Amino acid sequence: MTADPRGNMPPSLLAVTIDGPAGSGKSTMARLLAKKLGAVMIDTGAMYRAVTARVIDNGVDPDDETAVARVAREIHLRFAGEDSRQVLVDGEDESARIRQADVNALVSKISAYPQVRSELVGLQRKMAEGGPVVMEGRDTGSVVLPQARFKFFLVAGPDVRAERRRLEIAQAGESRDHKEVLEGITARDLQDSQRAVSPLVKPEGAVEIDTSQLDIDEVLERMLVLIVSDKYEAS
Ligand code: DC
């Protein structure tokens, strides 16, 4: 049977993972691909961000891994709204809160804690059991869903990624210069790729796409061509 990217596929047959560094285009592509495939998009970075925001807002000591892991265990996370864009934390819409500067600055540290990762990876796997998903993050094809049918690894040059982030921030009404954004991205890249647990790596079997010179439609087309041409056995 040939995969039909526009129809709903049985849950066991469709899981797509998209990993890559900040600004490589993961979220944009995951959202569009999920729409095309009739799948649910899961932004795993938003989940680490939600835990980080809770840690800050509840005055939990960020150096205390056990206390931070307790936040991850007890938090109730859900994606809602059009294109799964809203992040509901304990029923409250925290979509804007989790993108704020204090969360940006702390999230790499929080996401490096093994106990936090183990809580959230468990939750991510549970979310994927519910139906076809497009999951994006840093370890979704390597750790969370290594058995995923389709895995992509997106990359782009640091300057391109910083400029994309700067525009995103500008659209949200904040102004930052390119150099400042580039420094932030470079620091997070380093932390995310050098940490001991689940560092950012190209997952085995993933297709790498350099999005530096491609527009959104071109990347989507490349992904869809691979998915459409895939043959699989119905289980
Ligand atoms: O993609 P993002 O910028 O929203 O991710 C926020 C942070 O969370 C980033 O520093 C890396 C981390 N992260 C992670 O460690 N594992 C994931 N699966 C997703 C994000």
Image (tube, rainbow, N blue to C red):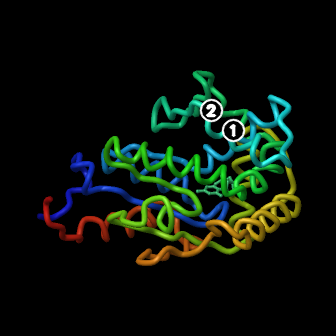
Q: Quadrant of the C terminus?
A: bottom left
Residue placed under numbered mark 1 in the picture: 70
Q: Position of residue 56 (x, y in %)?
A: 82, 36
Task: Say which element carries label 2.
Answer: helix
* Residue 219 horizontal side relative to residue 183, left or right: left
Q: Residues within 10 Å of mark 1 (few under 14, many from 20)?
A: some
Q: Quadrant of the N terminus?
A: bottom left
The residue sitting at 46% across, 66% down in the picture is 219
Check the image and report above or below for 215 versus 71: below
The residue sitting at 39% across, 70% down in the picture is 222
Residue placed under numbered mark 2 in the picture: 74
For badge 1, the amino acid type reads: Arg
Please tell me in which quadrant of the rendered image residue 188 appears: bottom right
Residue located farthest toward the front when viewing the structure as drawn: 66
For badge 2, the amino acid type reads: Glu
State the residue in front, 178 or 33. 33
